[in-house]
């Protein structure tokens, strides 16, 4: 015969009543609640939105360089064509009026190219501001206010798009002045 320890005989069995709210809390702890699923979806959405914003900012940077490459390529061909026309208009038996008009047309084409590039760069700056504002709203909400400073217009002189805009403008102004004062008057 086995003896039971004296403590075993003195054990009291108590049944605690479980309130309905405590039972719901226990179920919520065992099964993820719809709130946590919604929170996860919201966090995933915000993360994807942030990735999208960063991707768009990167795309704007790449587009600015593409515009500069486009300008360099087309301006080289336009200036090369104008130089070829100036050098060989007599040997090609082109009348002076047609040669002047053709050169002025090439200069006009260069000015149109400049306008396209400058408008594209300026619209890129505008889009950049919009994406940065969206990024700041998201970061303020998720990380904390002031995590990243807002861009300021007074820092315009540090933006490479502005440098590109000035470069394109100055190059075209120089070419237009040079063509109008040096090439076109000699085509008589």
Image: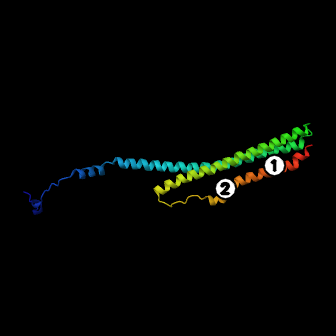
- Lateral position of residue 114 relative to residue 103, left or right: left
- Lateral position of residue 112 relative to residue 19, left or right: right
The circle drawn on residue 149 is: none
- Helix, strand or loop at disc 1? helix
Question: What is the distance, in whole Å, between disc 1 and disc 2 at their CAs?
Answer: 24 Å
Counting residues from the start of the chain, the first of labels 1 and 2 encountered is 2
Seen at 89% across and 39% down, the residue is 97
Mark 2 surroundings: few (<14), some (14-19) or many (≥20) residues within 10 A = some
**Residue 139 drawn above or below residue 91:** below
Residue 62: percent from left, percent from top:
64, 49
Q: Quadrant of the C terminus?
A: top right
- Lateral position of residue 143 relative to residue 35, left or right: right
51 vs 166, nearest the viewer: 166
Residue 58: percent from left, percent from top:
59, 50
Q: Quadrant of residue 153?
A: bottom right
141 vs 47, nearest the viewer: 141
Mark 1 surroundings: few (<14), some (14-19) or many (≥20) residues within 10 A = some
The circle drawn on residue 176 is: 1
- Helix, strand or loop at disc 2? helix
Seen at 45% across and 48% down, the residue is 44
76 vs 137, nearest the viewer: 137
Q: Are dots 1 and 2 in contact, CB under 8 Å? A: no
Residue 92: percent from left, percent from top:
90, 37
The circle drawn on residue 160 is: 2
Seen at 52% across and 50% down, the residue is 51
């Amino acid at each position: 015969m086995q003896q039971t320890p004296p403590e075993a005989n003195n054990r009291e069995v108590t049944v605690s009543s479980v309130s309905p709210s405590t039972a719901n809390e226990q179920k919520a702890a065992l099964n993820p609640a719809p709130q946590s699923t919604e929170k996860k979806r919201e966090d995933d959405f915000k993360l994807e939105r942030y990735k999208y914003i960063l991707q768009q900012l990167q795309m704007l940077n790449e587009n600015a360089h593409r515009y500069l490459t486009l300008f360099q390529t087309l301006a080289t061909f336009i200036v090369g064509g104008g130089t070829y026309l100036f050098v060989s208009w007599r040997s090609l038996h082109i009348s002076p009026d047609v040669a002047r008009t053709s050169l002025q047309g090439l200069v006009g084409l260069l000015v149109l190219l400049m306008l396209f590039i400058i408008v594209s760069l300026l619209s890129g700056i505008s889009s950049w501001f919009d994406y940065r504002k969206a990024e700041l709203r998201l970061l303020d909400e998720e990380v904390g206010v002031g995590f990243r400073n807002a861009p300021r217009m007074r820092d315009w002189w540090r933006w490479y798009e502005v440098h590109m805009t000035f470069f394109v403008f100055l190059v075209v102004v120089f070419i237009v002045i040079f063509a109008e004062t040096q090439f076109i008057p000699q085509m008589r």
